[in-house]
Amino acid sequence: MKATATALFALLVLASAAWPADTPAGWTPDLFQNASTIEFFTTNAAGDQHWSRVWVVVIDGAPYVRLGSASTERVNGNVNSPYVNIRVGGQEF
């Protein structure tokens, strides 16, 4: 459980630190500067889909999230793991 939460955290940090040429339009570290929350999308084994909202904080330009137990369970049970959709600043990635 902790490993998956760490993976989502690492995803956000790495995504904000390195912006490859194929990065979706609009995905920049600046998106997180004014955001207090982000949302991530998961699908469980039964096919139920869910958007979860979590707090985000930016330190030295890198976004950090801390998942509670319910969010961690959703990430762990995500059939599309290790991928999740993220919504921040009114945009979905």
Image (cartoon, grey):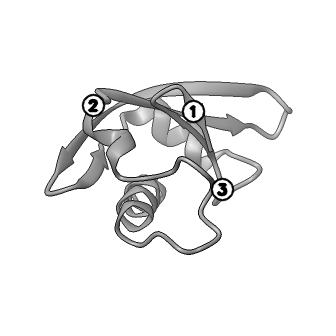
34 in relation to 31, above or below: above
Separation (CA) of disc 3 from disc 2: 24 Å
Name the residue: 28% across, 49% down. Answer: 64
88 in relation to 76, above or below: above
Label 3 amino acid?
Tyr
**Which residue is denoted by mark 2 in the rendering?**
34
Label 1 amino acid?
Gln
**Which residue is denoted by mark 3 in the rendering?**
83
Label 2: element kind: loop
Residue 91: mark: 1
The residue lying furthest to the left in this view is 60
Name the residue: 85% across, 33% down. Answer: 46
Separation (CA) of disc 1 from disc 2: 13 Å
Place of residue 56 in the rendered image (x, y in percent of width and height, measured from the top left):
30, 37
Label 2 neighbour load within 10 Å: few <14, some 14-19, many 20+: few
Q: Residue 45 lies in what quarter of the image?
A: top right
Label 3 neighbour load within 10 Å: few <14, some 14-19, many 20+: some
Mark toward the viewer: 3 or 2? 2
Instruction: Of the two numbered discs 3 and 2 on the same chain, state the one appearing first in sequence.
Output: 2
Name the residue: 85% across, 32% down. Answer: 47
Is 38 on the left or on the right of 91, as rendered?
left
Asked if labels 3 and 1 touch by Cβ distance under 8 angstroms, the answer is no
Place of residue 59 in the rendered image (x, y in percent of width and height, measured from the top left):
15, 51
Is 72 on the left or on the right of 86, as rendered?
left
